[in-house]
Structures are given as C-alpha cells and as structure tokens.
Amino acid sequence: MTSLAMAGALAAAVAACSSSDQAANSAPPAALAQSPAPASSAAPVSSPAPQAMSPIVIGPNDPHFVEADLPPLPDNLGYSPRPADYVRTVYKFAAHNADLLKYVPCFCGCERMGHHANDECFIARRSGTGQVLEWQPHGVICEVCLDVAHEAMQMHNTGASVEQIRRAIDTKWTTPNGSHTNTPMPPHAGGH
C-alpha cells in the first residue's frame, strides 16, 4: 500500500471513530496525503484506541438513587402514581425489611405474576446474604403495592409487631371479591 493510500485509510478511520465535532476539527484527508511519509512506512497502521466510556454514576440528587449499597430504581420511575421520594422510601424499606414484608399480602392482583407477598412487588433478586441485586419494577407503577408497603412501614416505625401489621393490612385491604397474594401468616411470637 502506498503512503498516500495509507494516509487516506488512516484519515477515514479517524473520521469514522470521531464525533461530528471532532471530525469537523480534524485535518482533511488531502492535508494528510500531502504530509511526507516516514522512511519506515512498512509498519502496520493501527486504528486509534477507542475512548473508554465512563460508567453512569448516580448519586443522592438522582431520583433513581436509594442508597449507596442498593441498585438504582427501575427506569419506569417517571410512570409512578406516587412521588419519587415516596417510591424511594418504600423501596428502601423493602430492601431492609424482607422479614416483615414477606408476611404482608398484596392486593393488586400480582399473584397472577407469581408473587406471594408484598416484598416481591419490590425485590426481584437478592444475594445469599440478603443484599438486593435487582429491583422488581412492578412496585414502582402500582399504587396498591406502594401503599400497602408504606402502611406496613408506618406501623413498623411505631413499634407494631409483624402480627399486628398483618392483621391491620388484612382488615383494611381485604374485600369480599378482591384478590390477594397467597401470603403465609407470620409465625406466632413467643409460641402463642
């Protein structure tokens, strides 16, 4: 390959890998063709190294941020019937209170999705140590899921037991013809 052809190929590769702003500021192929080729032009021409893409990092000011050790909330946050702060609070509570929400039923019909309790409306996958690895996006857009968990959280924060929370949720949300998850009853505290 002649030095003129190599210069043209190099210019085309640079232009193809550059953004439109960078391509507009690069030297035109004709200018490259006029530059003298080095004496040892037998070395292969390599393409420019691709620029590493920096990972998207979210922080406390991003509405998808829950806390540092949890994944960002699902992308459907903009479709939630509740404000982002409300959704973040509920998801954070679900992340740290699986032992409560696994005994709280959901009443939105999500048993048809295979859910067994309200915690599954928010958590899709956990590690062996219980760390949330993946959120369930369904809870973001379902006001029933969000409100049931929010009520459980409020009762929990006042010191109510799992049994009291379950009883109150069942009383408020159960309707004669309504559906709900097939959620196990909490074990009796102290063996009563």
Image (cartoon, rainbow, N blue to C red):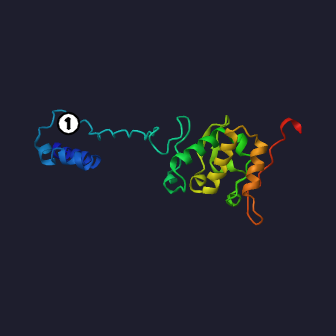
Q: State whether residue 156 is above or below residue 169.
A: above
Residue 28 visible, this orientation? yes
Numbered-mark total: 1
| Residue nearest the viewer, comparing 38 with 107 | 107
Secondary structure category for the residue under label 1: loop
Q: Residue at x 68, y 58 (%)?
A: 110
| Residue nearest the viewer, comparing 144 with 6 | 144
Residue 172 locus on image (x, y percent)? 73, 55
Q: Residue at x 15, y 33 (%)?
A: 39
Residue 61 locus on image (x, y percent)? 44, 40
The quadrant of the picture occupied by the N terminus is: top left
Q: Residue at x 11, y 38 (%)?
A: 36
Mark 1 residue type: Ser
Residue 9 visible, this orientation? no
Reading the image, the residue beneath label 1 is: 41
Residue 65 locus on image (x, y percent)? 50, 41
Q: State whether residue 149 is above or below residue 61.
A: below
Q: Residue at x 67, y 59 (%)?
A: 108
Residue 150 locus on image (x, y percent)? 63, 47
